[in-house]
Image (cartoon, rainbow, N blue to C red):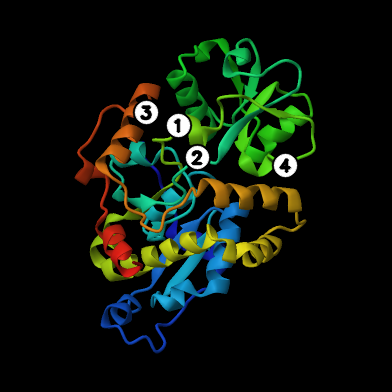
Amino acid sequence: MTHTFDRRRFLRSAGLLGLSVAAGGLAAPYLARAAAAQIRIVSNPGLENATLNALMDEQGYFKQFGVDAVIVQVPGATGPFDAISAGAADVCMVSGYNMVLSRIAQGADVKIVGAGMKKCALTVFARPDGMKTLADLKGKTVAVGPSLGLLHTLMLQLMREKGIDASQVTFVDKGSNDQCHEAVVKGEADACCSSISHLNDKDGLVVISEANMWQALPKCIFQTAYASDSAIRGKHEGMVAVMAAYGALYDYLMSPAAHDAFFEARRRAQKKFDKASAQATWDFNQVQRPYSRDLSLTGGDIGYLQDMFIGLGSLKQKQPFAAVADMSAAKAAAKLTI
């Protein structure tokens, strides 16, 4: 598969957030060197990502770790990866993409460099007409987004691990995470895989037993961070500083001290503020602690993902850990944030 990308067009059209930060007064030589090379961080413009970006800006973690960063927003599930593989961005820290390993296997000069959100913040919602377990989905229509996209992939893996024949379920593409949920509310589907941000919605839907994916798929890394080989080689110190900043952000996000800042960042990121959704996300972060200050992943983490995608047919074979991942920056960053 060949993916082309016009770098100039990308740089003209992508939404640039003014987050360039100088090292400013930090004495540590390491941090001063990190600020010498700008890191281009790319993400999708979704609500959760926008909230994290707003929090990062407000709390000043880039400045704390001497990062010179520009955050670029690119729409679409493949957008961030396309930008990185085209040389228009360096690293993606927060946008989940389930085809990273497949694209690397196809020859993209990209590697997984750590984790964003580790636990899967998804569950299965259904209409309240008798569906209580995953087995009850047989013969039903389930909204999951594009075929073998993130939602569909995780639903297939969930049913596989629970010993349920997924061929007896009709999966339909109703668009994004939120659109899948809305399709069930409107009666266009019987159930959906969707975000925990809907757990407080007063729409009459129920949560299917056994389908909380952070519990049902505990070995599955929800969001991998990935970077270009050139950034890993040529901007190592900047990459370390970026990952230390995100580790500090995640640690703060999961602490009670972040309450007011989180809700304010959410208000800034959402045109029409949804308090119930914000509260559901806040509660999940506090109780489940889906992030980690140490962003590094193990061979077992990557191996599970490879086995999952091979089983689902989107990856042909396993590759050695070093061929698809590089944890050097993440491990160095963890030492900075102890």
The residue closer to the viewer here, 102 or 331, is 331
Residue highlighted by disc 4? 200
Query: Is the residue marked by circle 1 packed among few (<14), some (14-19), or many (20+) residues within 10 Å?
Result: some
Q: Is the residue under label 4 in contact with that under label 3 (CB below 8 Å)? A: no
Q: Secondary structure at mark 4?
A: loop
Location of residue 151 in the rendering, given as x and y in whole percent from the top left corner: 54, 33
Residue furthest toward the bottom? 25
Q: Amino acid at mark 4?
A: Asn
- Count up the numbered dots: 4
Looking at the image, is mark 3 or mark 4 nearer the viewer? Answer: 4
Question: Residue at image x 71%, y 28%?
Answer: 206
Residue 188 horizontal/vertical position (percent): 74, 24
Q: CA distance from mark 3 to mark 4?
A: 31 Å
Residue at the disc numbered 2: 120
Q: What amino acid does circle 3 point to? A: Met
Q: Which residue position is annotated with label 1?
A: 217
Q: Mark 2 packing: few (<14 Cα in 10 Å), some, or many (20+)?
A: many
- The reply, left or right, for residue 92 in relation to residue 240 is right
The answer for how far apart the CA atoms under marks 1 and 2 are is: 8 Å
Q: Say above or below: 21 vs 13.
A: below
Q: Which mark is residue 308?
A: 3
Q: Amino acid at mark 1?
A: Leu
